[in-house]
Image (spheres, rainbow, N blue to C red):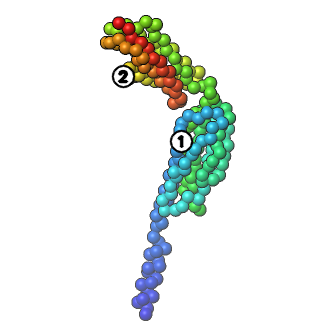
């Protein structure tokens, strides 16, 4: 009997001395996009995980440096911004009983309708087959600046600002489109149909 009591005592001692598995908190979330209109709701999905513990609560901070709204909940809804600008979203995820935390930050850009780029271009009024045709970008953007241009001319892509193209045959209704994108991912497209004559 004493032998069994000794074995049980050793087992209990071993359990009490065993180290607990380390707690690993990983804060993470996604937003449905990176550029929003003023007043548009952000769709946020919390992807935070906790190993060897449970997710107890989250602190969300929304705003610019020194001016943050704070929300204490695991999932958030109804977050909007009423002024254009670059905003931080900061998530701090906490494990239960103070076992650990982690922080993740993402930036989103909020624009109003006047901040999106405006795609525009010029080209000669008369376009003849076999003659090089310059397409001149005239696009504008008030905030951020245009960073990419993508032309589709008669089905062929041209990923630079102002291409020159030669049409080998005369044809009517050739589609020319230009899509411009600014530094914050907002874009606009202009499309025209042109005629190429002999």
Tell me the distance, in whole angstroms, between the alpha carbons under discs 1 and 2: 31 Å
At 49% from the left edge and 74% from the top edge, which residue is drawn? 16
Residue depth check, mark 1 versus mark 2: number of the one nearer the observer: 2
* Residue at the farthest front position: 172
Looking at the rendered structure, the secondary structure element under dot 1 is loop
The mark nearer the N terminus, 1 or 2, is 1
Residue 44 image offset from top left, x and y in percent: 57, 46
- Which residue occupies the foreground of this view, 177 or 185? 177
At 54% from the left edge and 48% from the top edge, which residue is drawn? 45
Q: Quadrant of residue 54?
A: bottom right
Whether 160 is drawn above or below 13: the answer is above
195 with respect to 93 (left or right): left
* Quadrant position of the C terminus in the picture: top left
* Quadrant position of the N terminus in the picture: bottom left
Residue 95 image offset from top left, x and y in percent: 56, 58
Q: Quadrant of residue 157?
A: top left
Q: Give the residue pinned by disc 1.
A: 32
Residue 70 image offset from top left, x and y in percent: 66, 46
Q: Give the residue pinned by disc 2.
A: 156
At 47% from the left edge and 77% from the top edge, which residue is drawn? 13
Residue 42 visible somewhere in the drawing: yes
Residue 63 visible somewhere in the drawing: no
At 40% from the left edge and 14% from the top edge, which residue is drawn? 172
Residue 188 image offset from top left, x and y in percent: 52, 25
């Amino acid at each position: 009997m004493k032998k069994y009591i000794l074995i049980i005592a050793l087992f209990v001692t071993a359990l009490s001395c065993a180290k607990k598995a380390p707690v690993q908190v990983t804060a993470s979330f996604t937003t449905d996009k990176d550029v929003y209109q003023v007043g548009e709701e952000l769709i946020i999905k919390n992807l935070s995980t906790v190993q060897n513990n449970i997710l107890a609560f989250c602190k969300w901070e929304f705003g610019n440096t020194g001016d943050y709204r704070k929300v204490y909940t695991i999932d958030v809804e109804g977050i909007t911004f009423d002024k254009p600008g670059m905003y931080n979203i900061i998530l701090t995820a906490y494990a239960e009983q103070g076992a650990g935390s982690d922080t993740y930050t993402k930036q989103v850009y909020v624009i109003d309708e006047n901040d999106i780029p405006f795609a525009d271009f010029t080209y000669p009024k008369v376009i003849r087959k076999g003659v090089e045709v310059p397409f001149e970008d005239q696009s504008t953007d008030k905030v951020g600046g245009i960073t990419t241009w993508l032309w589709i001319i008669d089905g062929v892509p041209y990923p630079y600002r102002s291409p020159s193209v030669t049409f080998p045959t005369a044809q009517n209704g050739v589609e020319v489109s230009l899509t411009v994108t600014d530094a914050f991912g907002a874009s606009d497209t202009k499309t025209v149909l042109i005629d190429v004559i002999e």
